[in-house]
Image: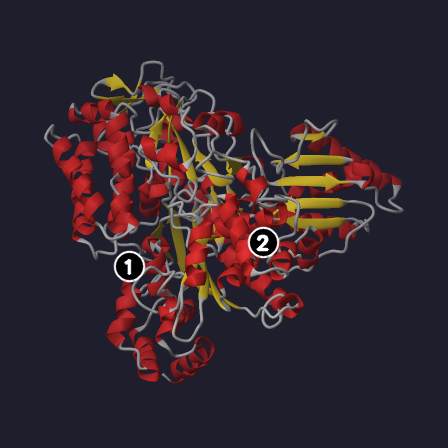
Amino acid sequence: MTDMRAFIDGLLAGTGCGPGATIPILQGIQHKFRHLPEPALRQVSEATGIRLADLIGVATFYHQFRLGEIGSHTMRVCHGTACHVNGSENIHDHLCRLLQIPEGGDTCPSNEFTVERVACLGCCTIGPVVQIDHTTYGHLTASSLAEMVEDFRATRHETISDVDAIGRQPASRCGEIRVGLGSCCIAKGSAELFHRLRQTVRELGIDVQVKRVGCVGACYRTPSVEIRLPGGKEAFYTKVGPGDAVAIVRRHFRPPGLGRRLVRWVDRTLEEFVAGNECREMPDASEAPASAPLGRQVRIATEGLGEMDPLDLDEYLAQQGFEALRQALARPPEETLETIARSGLRGRGGAGFPTGAKWSRVRAAHSPDGSKHVIVNGDEGDPGAFMDGMLMESFPYRVIEGMLVAAWCVGAAEGTLYVRAEYPRSVARLRGAIRQMEERGLLGAGILGSKFHFKLQLFEGAGAFVCGEETALIESMEGRRGIPRIKPPYPADCGFWQRPTLINNVETFAMVPWIVRHGAEAFASLGTEMSRGTKVFSLAGKVVRAGLIEVPMGITIREIVEDIGGGAPEGKTFKAVQIGGPSGGCIPAALGHTSVDYEALAAAGAIMGSGGLIVLDGGDCMVDMARYFMTFLRDESCGQCTFCRIGTMRMYEILERFCQGAGRRDDFDEITRLADLAGIGSLCGLGRTAPNPVVTTLKYFRDEYDAHIDGRCPAGRCKPLIQYVIQDICTGCTLCAQRCPAKAIEARPYRRHQISDDLCTRCDVCRAACPENAIVIMSGGIPCPGRAHKATPAEPLEKHE
């Protein structure tokens, strides 16, 4: 008890004791004990005066907190949209069976692992994803989970030093080796590759800079390495691993005094590498590194993608960093504010409110003490969206610079970076950026020799989708449950601690430095009349080239999917896109000509949202997609509004009946009525837009709902309506029986196998393993056309520690 009291006293000394410290206090306790022990909460209540009931009320609202004890290690299964369409439910179910977790529980009998559901881990391009403590595994299948568990058990005490803690290497006249170190890159092994390259050049005595860069955009090609040589010569490599480090270095840089025998050995290693890996030097401008734009991309928020060290302040300054802030401070705030208004920039968080108008309102507002506040909304909670996470990881200085320009324009001296807890790398890089800026006089008093003073803090969210709504976000910052406030008053008039408060999302602030430097007209020349500039999207799902893209407004959906994304994988058909997150809509391929702008998407029944764009193919069931999003929205509803709290539950129940084959014709009228009521009777955007996935799937895919009433799922996704059947062409190789995790297939060598329908979990492992394509998915006695091709074999186990 004495030790706990000492810990609590030390924690409170760092967080403070006011109500606004509630969430940081709870986070500190959970980090120490891995849950929230009641004695610790009681001591906090006694020391701070915060009621125990309030502490427990906050703890039970946010997903991050646990009141009960958990296993020694936490397995977090991502159920984001991209992971869902790639089978995350099968992964979760099989993981629980593998670990012998009892039904209704989440911890294995040995107390070694606790399995948790997570809305999104921000690694959408490598789904399905599981994170065990700090190690992320991607591209998982049910058959690879046992290997994942054993790999973690064998290596859990091994760590790779933090790539963000390593100092910058000095530039070299001999060249530069760039390695992308965004979250998706790291999850695919780029961190280990980065360390191996640095080790290699050090051991061989080669004078070359191995440079970390942020997200390279082309997540589908990582790990990637880019070589920059004197004279402008370049080369790049994709999908390489740590074992290729020596060959890559040796191909371009000869070690001084290297012995002849060693040269021959290294050259043989190089030949083997070149024979087995994608590797080419760029003969002309048509060949480009992984970060080069595909299609009609334009870099504004992502300017310098794949080129800059995220934490190298000197490099950011050399690339016109803080030039926009310098220009803004040299003229009256009204001039810069007018530039933002004339540019036509609209908030990139989803609603699309004119940024200049919002800034003007905050500037004109008054508070009793004259203080104002600026908040960067980095609580990117949409499953299937990772744009803001990548911007914070790759361009922390740019985001902060945009925030400082805004603060100068509206007259604020304090600000907060609000970042979701599921983005630990974003948190780490922003903290590192803040620290360096404070040391260099870019934060604090007298910024850039002016009279502008600004104090910046970082606040970690605790896991609640509704906190993406600006007033719910403010409630959580003030130490309460994230329940949206009634508006008006709006935050611009009365926000954080009753001060006028400006809130924009990460991408909006990241656009500001470019606009100030290049002028309003340059930005306004891009896009459409009502939707100016560019938009950053996370492109994921059933698409060949998944990654982070930035495109001018007005581009069509088909151009994004096919020209930039490369279309659906071989043997698959582009069916639809889900755009705008859980509050967005599903747009069919037939409307691929739809312009990507606020008005056109709204007319089609979707919203821009924060920028998640998930491509769906013929193997995706639109009824299942509607149920998936309604499950998410039901779980994330704060419960304040009856139409949202009850309406989402009732809509989910109807969709669940459809997926069970028990839907009725009169359900169409009922679910439409519920959607209308939720849309008009909810207080915040979560409830008002919750019906969108249902409304759009009913509008564009009514035939699939009709098929479910008849007991068929044409896509072969809804488990109660499908069967796995082995055809006569089965050769009896026994591979399906060997790999079936549910033991639903008896091994019968050289004879046609059979699947026990009672034991079958519909995990798809057998179909992926069958070399003869002898296993088909049937629904209502008919083969499912959307699942006519076998699943893509799993890639080698990918992980990052």
Q: Residues within 10 Å of mark 2 (few under 14, many from 20)?
A: many
Q: For the view shown, which residue lies furthest in the bottom direction?
A: 2
Q: In terms of secondary structure, where does tag 2 sit?
A: helix
Q: Is residue 204 left or right of residue 277?
A: right
Residue appearing at x 36%, y 14% in the figure: 729
Q: Which mark is residue 398?
A: 2
Q: Nearer the viewer, mark 2 or mark 1?
A: 1
On screen, residue 735 above or below 99: above
Please state the horizontal and vertical placement of residue 116, each as a whole percent of the image: 34, 53
Picture quadrant where residue 496 is located: bottom left
Q: Are marks 2 and 1 in contact (CB under 8 Å)?
A: no
Amino acid under disc 2:
Arg
Q: Which mark is residue 630?
A: none
Residue 402 seen in the current view: no
Residue located beneath label 1 in the image: 488
Residue 646's spot in the image, x, y percent?
16, 49
Quarter location, residue 611: top left
- Find residue 266 and report its horizontal and vertical position in percent: 78, 38
Q: In the rendered view, does 518 fall on the left or right side of 104?
A: right
Q: Quadrant of the N terminus?
A: bottom left
Looking at the rendered structure, the kind of residue marked 1 is Pro
Query: Is 638 or 791 nearer to us in this picture?
Result: 638
- Whole-angstrom CA distance, mark 2 to mark 1, is 32 Å
Q: Position of residue 618 (x, y in %)?
A: 35, 24
Residue that appears at 52% across and 50% down: 340
Q: Nearer the viewer, residue 502 or 590?
A: 502
